[in-house]
Image (cartoon, coloured by chain):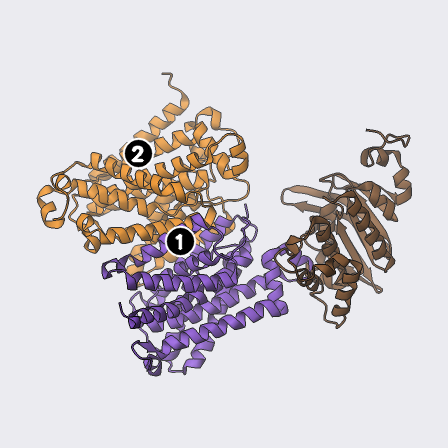
Chain colours: A orange, B brown, C purple
Amino acid sequence: MRLSRHHVAWALLALAAIALVAYAETWLSGYERTVIGFAGIYAILAVSLSFSNGLTGLFSLGHPAFMMVGGYTAAILTFPVNRKGFMLPALPEWLATLELTLLPATLAGALAAGLVAVVVGFPVLRLRGHYLAVATIGLIIVLGVVINNANDLTRGALGLNGIPRLTTLWVILGWLAVTLLVCWRLKHSSVGRSLMALRENELAAACLGVNRARSRLIAFSLSACFAGVGGALWAHLLTNLTPGSFGLALAFMLVVMVVIGGSGSLVGAILAAMAIMVLREVLRPVEQAVSAYGLVQIVTAILLIGTLLLRPQGFFGSSEPRFLRPCLPTSSLKGRETPTDGTARP
Amino acid sequence: MLTLDAVEVWRGPSLVLSDVSLRVEAGEIVALLGANGAGKTSTLLTVSGHLRPRSGRIRLDIDGKAHDLASLPPPEIVALGVAHCPEGRQIFGGMTVLENLRLGAYLRRDGAVRADLDRMMSLFPVLAERRGGLAGRLSGGEQMMLAIARALMSRPRLLLLDEPSLGLAPQLVEQIFDVIAEIRGAGTTVLLVEQNAAMALDVADRAYVLETGEVQLSGDAHELAGDPRVREAYLGLAPEGTAGP
Amino acid sequence: MSDAYILQQLINGLVLGSLYALIAVGFTMIYGIVRLINFAHGDILMVGAFSAFAILSVFGFPLWSAIVAVLTLGAILAMMIDLVAFRPQRAAPQVNGFITSLGVSILIQNLAILLLSGQPRPFNLPGWMRGNVHVPGVRVTVLDVTIVLITLAILIALMLFVQRTRLGAAMRATAENPLAASLMGIRINRAIATAFGVGGALAAVAGVFWAGRAGQIEPLMGFVPGLKAFVAAVIGGVGSLPGAVLGGFLLGFAEVLFVGLLPPAYGAYRDAFVFGLLILVLLVLPNGLLGRPAEERA
C-alpha cells in the first residue's frame, strides 16, 4: 500500500491523540480524567448525530433513547453475577449467570440500539422535518416509561448502581476512532454522497436512483448503534443508570454541538463537543459559587440561538476543518460541501 | 403616473434587474414583455414593495403628489392605490370567493365596499354563482377572474397584472384580455406583464421588452408588434410577417 | 364498574380535555400562521402559572385580576419570542425554527430555575375554588366547572374573532398565503404577532388552571402539557382551530379512560400511551381529523 499524504496525516493525528491520552492517564487526577472521559463520549455521540442529522438531513432528537438501550443492555451484561442476584432477582436464568467484559457488552448494546432503531425507524422515518423530531422525543418518553416499569430487567426507577467502572480513556479513544473512521469513510463514499443528495433535494435524489427509505434507515440505525456505544461507555464511567439518565436535556446538548460544529462536519462535531465541555467545566464552579443553577444551560441555549441567527451553517458547515485538508482523499477536496440555504439541520 | 429610473434589484446573490427605466402614464395599458427570467415579475414585485432596489428611483405621481415607492412598506403602497395581481393567481384557496373579494378591500374604510362587491359580481358573473364556495375549488380561469376582481376591490389607480394568461385556454385568454381593456376603460391604469406577447401588444398602448434585467426595446405597442426583432423573438413569426416555425 | 365511576371518568376527561383544547388551540394558531412547532409553548404555560402564583399568593390580589394579568403576560411573552427568535428567521428552513424554539424553551426553563429555584412550590387557587359542587355520586370541584366554562367561553370568543373580524380575516389570509396577504395591504408581521399573542395568552391561562389542579408549580411543569397539546393538535389536524379543540377533548377523554378503565398497573404507562398515539396518528392520519394537506416549506 502506497503511503499517500493523507495516510501520513491520519497517522500523525492518531499519534497526537495517543500522546494526549497517555499524558492524561499518567498525570491527571481522577476527576479530570472523568471529565475528559465524558468529553470523549460526547464526541462519539456528536459525531454520530452529525452523521445522521447533518449529512442526511434527518432531524432526530432520539439519541438519548438509544443510549438508554445501549447503556442498560451493556450494564446488565457486565454486572457481576454475585450482585446480580441481589439487584435483579427476577432476571431470566441465562442472563443471571452471564458476566461479560466491556467490549462484548458494548457491542451487544450497540446492536440492541441498532435493532430498536430499525424497528422504530421503519414507520417513523417516513415523517419529515419537525414531525420526525417530535416523534423521536416521543420515543425518548416512551422508552423511559418502559424502562421505568420493566422492574425485572432494569430495577425500574431505582436504577442500576455499582456498575463496574470499566471505561478508561483508552477505551473511549478507541471507540471514538472507530466511530470517526466508520462515519468518515461513509461520508466520503458514494453512500455519503447519496445521503447528502437526499438532504439537498429528495425528489431529485430519488430520480437519480437513491433509495430514499433505505438510505435514511441505514443512516438512522448506524447512528443509533454509536449512540448505544456512547450509552454503554457512559454507564461504565458513571457507574450508575436510571431511566432519567438520558433525557431531553442531553438531546439538546447534542443538538447544540452539532449545530455549532456544523451539521455534517464530523470533526467539527468533535471540536464543538470539546468546546462545550470546556465551557461547562468553566461555568460549573461559577454556577455553584453564585448558586446560579441553570446558568450552563442558559449560556448554551443563547449560544445555540445566536448561532442559528448569525451563522446557521455552524462553524464548518458540512465540510471538515481546514487544518484537516491533508486528511481528505484528494477526490473530495473540491465540490460544494456547504448547504447553500443556510440549513442547520442538526 | 409611475416612473422607474435606473432601478437595480438583487435577489440574494443574483442580479435580477440591472438597469430598468420605464414610464406608465395615467389611463394607459403598458405591456412588459420578455422571456422567462427576464425580470418582469421582479419589476412588479419591486413596484409593490416586496423587493427593494439597491439603486435607482421609483416614483408614483397621484393627485399631484409624488411618492417614492422604494422607501415605502407594501401596505402603504397599496394604500396609495397600487394593486398587484400576482403570477399564479395566489388566491386564498381555503376561504370563500366572497371572503377573497372582501380581503381585496382590506384597507378600505369607506362604505362603498358592498356596492363594489356587487359590481364585481356583475362584471364576473361566475363569481356571483360561486360566491359562497371555496376559492380553491374554482377552475383556473375562474380563479384568474377572482384574482383580478380581488385586486380591483381596492379601487386601485394602478393595477399591476402578472401573467394573466398563464395556464389558461385560449378562449379564456381572450375573455381576460377583454376584461383588461374594460378596466382601462373604467379609468384604471394597467402595467401588464405577459409572455403571450401577441395578445399583450394587441391590448396595450405602449410596451417595453425586458431581457436579462434590462429594457431592450420600447415604444408604441402597434409599432413594436411590427418590429422584426420582436416578431422573431417573441411572436414566433418570420421577419416578413408570414407565420413561421 | 359503576355508572358513577364512568361518569366521574367522563367528567375528568371533560376537564382535562378543556385544558388540552386551550393549549392546543393556541399552539395550532401559531403553527397555522408560521408553520413552526413552537417548542416553547408549554413554557409560556409555566410562566402563566408562576405569574398567577406571584399575584395571588405573594401579593394577594383577587382572582380576576390574576387572570387578566396572566392573559396579558402570556401574550407579551409569546410576542417577544416571535420577535426575538422566529421573526429573524422567517426565510430559513423549517428545522432551524424548531431548533431555535427548542433553545428558547430550554432558556426559559433554566431562567426560571435560576431565578426561582427548581423546587416545586405549592400553589393553591382561592379556597372557594376547591369546594365541591353537589352532583350525586361524583366529585366535581368549582375549579373543574370553572375550567370547562371558561374554556368554552374563550373558544367561542376566539371563533368569533377569527371568523368575523377584520384582524381575524387578516390572520387567516396570512396563514393561507403570506405573499397574497401582503399584496392586500395586510401587515404580515402584525398578523403573526397577533397569532402569537393570542396563543400565548391561552397557554398562560391554561397554566393557571393546570397549576390549580396539580396543586403545585415548578419550572419544568410546561414540558409535558405542551407536548400533549401538540399531540392533540396533530390528532385534530395542525393548523385547524376546530381540529385543535376536537383533538384536545379527544385526547383528554382518551387519556382519562386509558387510566381509568385499565388495571391500575397500567396507569404508569399513561404518557407512553399518549406518545404512542401521536406516532400512530402521524403515520396513519398525517393531516389529522380536520386538517388539510400541509405544504412543507423546503
- Residue placed furthest toward the left: A82
Residue A161 position (above or below residue C120)? above
Picture coordinates of residue B129, whole percent (x, y):
72, 60
Residue A17, label in figure? 2
Badge 2: how crowded within 10 Å, few (<14), some, or many (20+)?
Answer: some
Chain identifier of the residue bearing label 2 in the image: A
Q: Amino acid at mark 2?
A: Ala
- Label 2 residue SS: helix
Q: Is residue A139 visible?
A: yes
Judged left or right of residue A226, residue B173 is right
- For the N terminus of chain A, the quadrant is top left
Seen at 78% across and 61% down, the residue is: B67
**Frontmost residue, C283 versus A48:** C283
| Distance in Å between CA atoms under marks 2 and 1 | 45 Å
Q: Which residue is mark 1?
A: C278
Q: Is residue A267 visible?
A: no
Measured as percent of width and height from the top left, residue A129 is found at 47, 47
Residue at image location 86% in from the left, 31% down from the top = B243
Return the residue nearer the eye: C216 or A281. C216
- Residue C64 location (% of width, % of height): 44, 81
A88 left or right of A289 in image: left
**How many marks on residues?**
2
Residue displayed at 40% across by 78% down: C55
Amino acid at circle 1: Leu
